[in-house]
Amino acid sequence: MKFQKLLFGCLWLTGSVLLFTCDTKNNIDPAFKNYFIKYYGEDGNHEAKDFVVNDDGTVIILGTVSFGQTQAVQTRRVYIVKTDLEGNELWNRTLGSTFNEEAADIESIIGGPDAGNFLILSNFDRAADRTNMRLTVINSNGDSLKSYEYSQYLSLRGLSVTSSASGIMYISGLTTDIDAGSDKNVLLTTPPPILEDYLIIRLRNDYTIEFDDRIGGSYEGAAVKVVPSGSSFVYAAYSDELTSSNLPDNNEHEHNFIFRLFLSNPTSAAVSLFSGSLNLDEKMIAFTDKPLFNTFCAIGTQSDFNGANRKAYATVVSSSLSSVIAEGVVLSGPNEYEGVAVSAASTSYLMLANEINSANRRDIVFIKMSTGLVPEFTIKFGAVDNDDRGAAVAELPSGDILILGTMQLAGQQDKIALIKLRPNGTF
Amino acid sequence: MGFFKFIVGLIILSGLSIHVSAQEERTDCEQMLAIASEEFNSGRFYGIPALLKPCVDRGFSREQKQRAFLLLAQTYLLLDDPISAENSYLEVLRANPEFETDTALHPIDLVYLSKKFTADPIFAVFAKVGGNTSPVRVIQTVSPSGQPVNNNYGLRAGFQVGGGVDYNFTRFLAISAEAEFGFTSYKKTQTRFSDDLLELTANQSWATIPVYAKYTFVKGNFRPYGYGGFAIQFLNSENGKFISQKRDLSDLNPVILPESETTNRSLMEFRNTFNRSFLIGGGVRYKKGLDYFFVDVRYYFGLSNIVVPTSSADYTGVLPELGHADDMFRIDNLSLSIGYYHPFYNPRKLKHAKTKTVLKGINKSSK
């Protein structure tokens, strides 16, 4: 009987322990709440482009939504999502347009009468082979307050917009309405037609054009970004223009990174700096919007002249453009790579690139890198059979890392993906 | 060939002759048992043990043995030989472990003697097989999207096999332990991004060790029972197949793409292997000889969250590939089994005779 009592006692005790350890909402660890991959979008396919992180911890994501499955009947519109830092969607907006329109950049307005609101740069197809730009001002609720079209050339495309504390703004991009009188590569024995000039537009705080510059004379080229540097500005661009022997020039369309320091008008640059390799193309994709330890960083893609053998290529320059601190390939391997985005964190540069496999499908690669382009760690996101691509990256005030990209889910639908990581790159 | 036929024929012949011989012996012993009963009724007790001995040694069937030893037990009681009476009654229980005296049929001294003994099984073993279904109970919905998602879990059929052992404290109450291997399945259908569908069909295999207290009604051919207890569950594997379908229904030109199906893939990296549950159940045993067939219905209430949260935060895998993130959930299981139950009867003398109920029985039968 004693044994029986003991056995019952043990059973009761075990049962009680088991009962009291029942998993409930209160005792499970919701790791997904703070570090996650979250997707955004509704009907249609959604392509991520850029984001801004606000002081209140919210994030406004900019992208493009496409309706319809074939290019011929596709309708594209600018799509905006606001989330909190747990990735919960607060609202989303699709901006109206009478044209197919693609998002290009979003920035906080830091000066002028609209300070506190947000600038959205987009490009719309006014007609066949004719793209114009639009600047839309939205408030923190996503309401469109006003918008301005820029069509001073037949076709022009904005890549980025910069807001300054004084209220003036710069749009960087390119135009195919070229300046025929500009310098060309005189080494070419049979000069090909000039296709693109890079374009920088300076706007007053009422969004009217103060002046615009078509710079180049290049077969291909674009201004990627204008950023303030002290009392001056730096523009970062790429083109196949001659480098005045700053780099070895040849009789090829060889693209290089170009950095120029200017006071107000980019055509009157005080300092020029070039980065690139002989007999290889380097096309810039992104440039940091603030300095890190008095340096700026650009990322792009290096390839052969025919576009093959793509590698992610980066250059760090001093903020005064006095020197190139470091330059070179940051990602290469059996697969190909293309640079996507770069941002300055507190002590490192955060870079995004796409790894491209033999089936031409991409994965997102994140690299944390020193100002000397020494990698701290690399992480890859995505599925082998899907086409996933990066868009933007930023460090949060807490040190956590926020990555924006587009994930092709189940091989059939593109959605905006927001990824939040710990500072060491783990979830 | 001829030799082989000869051997087979010889074996059959020998078998037949043994069978006939045993039959004849039983007929003889039945006559002997009748003579012994007459002797008993005539009050000639002393010769009965010697009369029955040859048949006790070799000839009685199980039923005849029960009657013979019952007669011997009564005889020894009357001859004031309690040790031989007890031995004889023990043989009665060995012949029929379910034999019980009745105050209306048996002399009171035999009834009292019987209360010193029991043949109740201490252990019993059983085996079972059946079908099951596993309802999912969500602790917390996890949306892979920034917006809430709509998840529906559907029931699917599985099956299980198992076996166990009962340790009987009393005739009614037992502690049972089992080893059960179950194959379960569930289906999750998620609607997200307005109208898009993602369907997961998952198949799990479990090894379960339930321990429970069981109460059984012991009268009649149909013997209902009920039980409750706890179980440790090991999730051995979970494989899932995903079907995704993009559906843009709000568009002016609605788009519904064909379903995209993945191959079967393991989901074990997102699962806790060790889980707990408590269970309740019941059933009916049908008596067949000294053993039983039974039908059992059981419900496991899962206590553990079987999901580790990595599926909602992963560099590669189902989240980037399909946009799938597991909810935090417990999984229950409802099963219906049929089985076979075999008690190990153990005729033995009790330390304390249970004589309290005898008087109650006499009063009852006199009414």
Image (spheres, grey):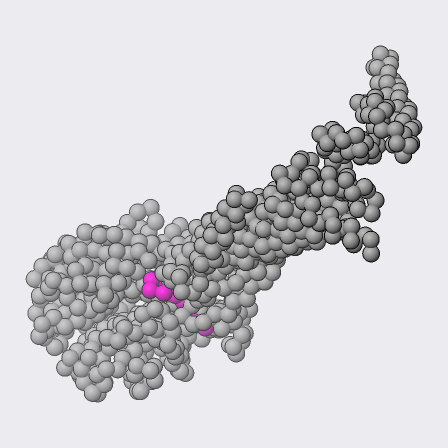
Instruction: State the residue at coordinates (17%, 55%).
Output: A370
Based on the picture, tell me whether residue A181 belongs to the magenta stretch: no
| Residue at 45% in and 54% down | A17
Question: In the rendered image of this protein, does residue A154 appear above or below residue A331?
Answer: below
Residue A243 visible (yes or no): no
* Quarter occupied by the N terminus of chain A: top right
Image point (58%, 47%), residue name:
B175
In this view, the residue in front, B274 or B318, is B274
Q: Nearer the viewer, residue B314 or A94?
A: B314
Q: Is residue B99 left or right of residue B136?
A: right
What is the span of residues highlighted in magenta in the rendered image? A33-42
The quarter of the displayed image where residue A352 is located: bottom left
Nearer-the-camera pick, B1 or A238: B1
Q: Quadrant of residue B17?
A: top right
Residue A142 to residue B325: above or below = below
* Residue A59 picture location, percent across and down: 30, 73
Quarter of the image with the C terminus of chain A in it: bottom left
Name the one closer to the observer, A393 or B363: B363
Q: Residue furthest front?
A: B80
Residue A39 magenta-highlighted: yes
Residue B367 visible here: yes
Q: Position of residue A18 (x, y in %)?
A: 47, 54
What is the total number of numbered labels drawn onto the structure image?
Answer: 0
